[in-house]
Image (cartoon, rainbow, N blue to C red):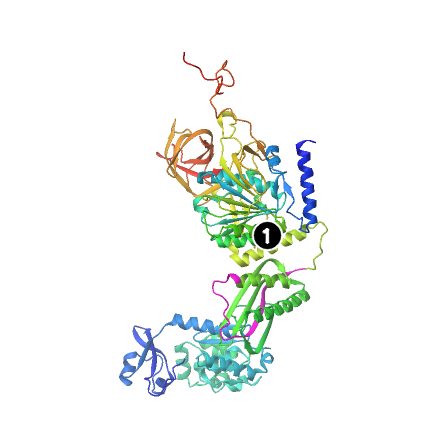
Amino acid sequence: MDRSTRIKTLAALRTQLAGLDGRPVAGAGVRVALGAPAIDATLDGGLARGAVHEIYAARPADAAAAAGFTVGLAIRAAGEKPIVWVRQDFLDHEAGRVHPPGLADLGLDPGRVLLVRAKDIAALLRASGEALRCAALGAVLMEPWGVSPLLDLTTSRRLGLAAEESGVPALLLRVAADPAPSAAATRWRAAAAPSAPLEAGAPGHPAFDITLERRRGGAAGETWAVEWNRELGVFRERPALSGAVVSLPAGRPHRAGAPDGGLRRAG
Amino acid sequence: MAGCGAPDEPPLVIAGKDRGALRLSATGRKAARLGLGPGLTLADAWARVPDLDVVEADPGADDRLLLRLAAACERYSPSVALDPPHGLVLDVTGCGHLFGGETALCARLGGDLKRAGVGARWAVAGTPDAARALARFGKSGIIAPGTDESAVRPLSIAALDAPPDTLLALRRAGLKTIGDLAGRPSAILSARFGEALAAKLRRTLGRETAPLTPLRPPPPVRVERHFPEPFLHMEQMESVLAGLIEAAACILEERGEGGRVFEASFFRSDGEARRVAVETGRPTRDAGAVLRLYRERFETLADPVDPGFGFDGIRLGVAACAPLGAAQVSLDGRAVEAAALDGLVDRLVARLGRERVLRFAARDTHLPEAAFAMRPAADAAPEAIAWTQPPPDDPPARPVRIFDPPQRIEQVAALVPDGPPRRFRWRRVTHDVVRVEGPERIAPEWWRAGTDGVTRDYYRVEDSHGRRFWIFRAGIYRETADPGWFLHGLFA
């Protein structure tokens, strides 16, 4: 049995078990694949729908990259359903506004997005809680700014329960904040990565370095270099970039930096 | 208005600046008995009565009080109009039976005003003008239907509210009461004093009626309940409101309509009135959903509904209705999902306000800052323009984040003046550009009035850390000598 079949069997068994527990299977067990096989294998088949997922920008300057990665996750998770994007007002000045033509260029029809502007984190949490209870949604994207005592373990548990009940994933995009204890199913750290250049040295498709920092009930810590493919609406693992490293001179041994053979000895 | 005053208090007068002098604008009863009246200069008043309690006139406060009284009077009639100065007109047609007859209604209204500390004169008559004339120049009371003319006839012609020179001319002609005028042919009056006076006379005599312009148009559907004893608890209030919403839903169903704006008025026993409105995105007569919206609204009111000494009446008006046929549930569940989303929008709007729940709409322009609009999601969607998509296999041409206004970047180094930047500084960090695409030249829309911009050259650039920016040079060298550089957006 190859790995992917095993993953599918396991996922099916989990769903069955959840059904036996008497818990609703509406969203909790459903997983959406991200498209990159290595990531999906680590995630046991993909991102759980009825759960909270946190995406942290590695540095404040990576906010746009983290937003791009989150929009990608939302597109994967939502399918054809509408998306609610709850945003704190302060972000408009600090991190820029949501730019619908840019969303369209990532493959998300802006007509499907409902933008909710919250004036503070308390309002943001209330609106998100309300939205998470609406099973007609594909995803709820929450974007607070900075740290707040309101974003604690209890809050994230509450959001998690609401998400589990409705089967709507909650994507919490956090900028200018350090990870805090939470009940999130996964926690990601996203950073911008050099893109594969097009002809004439033009910047290429959106590329990210993503780290799965935490995963409930599973190993974590892996880092992947991924690229967002708009046509297929999937993440793809990126081959190592030739442009980012210095090209090797011809005739030099391939394992130049290897500890045993590479170093030239003075002699 | 008020100011009866204890026997030992000095007479109260209210004075304000009028025609270059301080004049009395109103007087208390005691001052009136001493012969002081509006229009007298304050100096003259002092000369007559040295011991006066003078208060400065504040017309703004008078207007606010009148508006508050108007809101409180809405419990007696949905159609309340202002009659400046200091007057209100209520259309009580068909309202009397709710209070046990017009006499009882007037008694209750009079009691309310008295408790609020407002002295009032009032009259009930067949036309607004007749009632106004009787209240201001006659004596308070209810005029039996059809007897308006005989009641109004003895009043002074001042009740016609005509300009002073007209009144003077009439008096000189010996016409002192409305009755004197009523006997004259209307054509002669309008030829001498204008049609307005003749019309006013006809209306005051009850021969014709003019439509009232209410402060707020009465809602097409309204249900209300009044209680002999005020109640204090919010739970009771909610259950009454739930009953009213259900009653309104029944009326809406008979009319084949749904409500879009619901307005609940809570009348407090001390005369205060509070209105709370909720809106829905599409017409509805789902009583449960409307009640849920009200619960959301009550939770988030900055100034909560305060029962005070208790509510003694609640009215629910449906201020805006729209046709709503019986719904047929489609089998694919799409309609159910759409309805669920509409419900969510309504709840969010009730909680946060309509300008905070938005949808994007594309606009037909190539100027980046004008290419999209944000519209309240509660509004009906206008026909949508399709969003432009980049050609397949091209990376995004527009950033995922945009700055409004664009942010200035400094220390931009380019190899040639017209060329792409090699390095720039934004928010105190220097970025070395390793990849670049451009320029995409965007010219201002010269064919529209009021555009005075410069041509912008947009570049998509990527720095050595892989961060992608959308930057532009404002102006080409042909247009300006020293074009500035700006950062407009961030790519994912």
Q: Is residue B215 among what the camera can see?
A: no
Q: Where in the figure is residue A53, as x and y percent of width and height? A: 56, 44
Above or below: residue B484 compared with residue A248: below
Is residue B307 in the magenta section?
yes
Residue B37 located left or right of residue A70 = left
Q: Which residues are magenta?
A: B299-324
Write the residue at 51% across / 44% down: A173
Q: Quadrant of residue B37?
A: bottom left
Tell me which corner region of the image, top left, top right, bottom left or bottom right, holds residue B320: bottom right
* Residue at (42, 86) in percent of width and height: B174
Q: Chain of mark 1?
A: A
Whether B103 is drawn above or below A198: the answer is below
The amino acid type of the residue labelled 1 equals Ala
Residue furthest out toward the top: A267
> In the rendered image, which quarter contains the N terminus of chain B?
bottom left
Q: Position of residue B467 (x, y in %)?
A: 46, 34
Q: Which residue is mark 1?
A: A162
Residue at 34% x, 86% y: name it. B35
Q: Is residue B260 above or below residue B401?
A: below
Residue A45 position, x and y percent, is 63, 38
The residue closer to the viewer here, B395 or A221, is A221
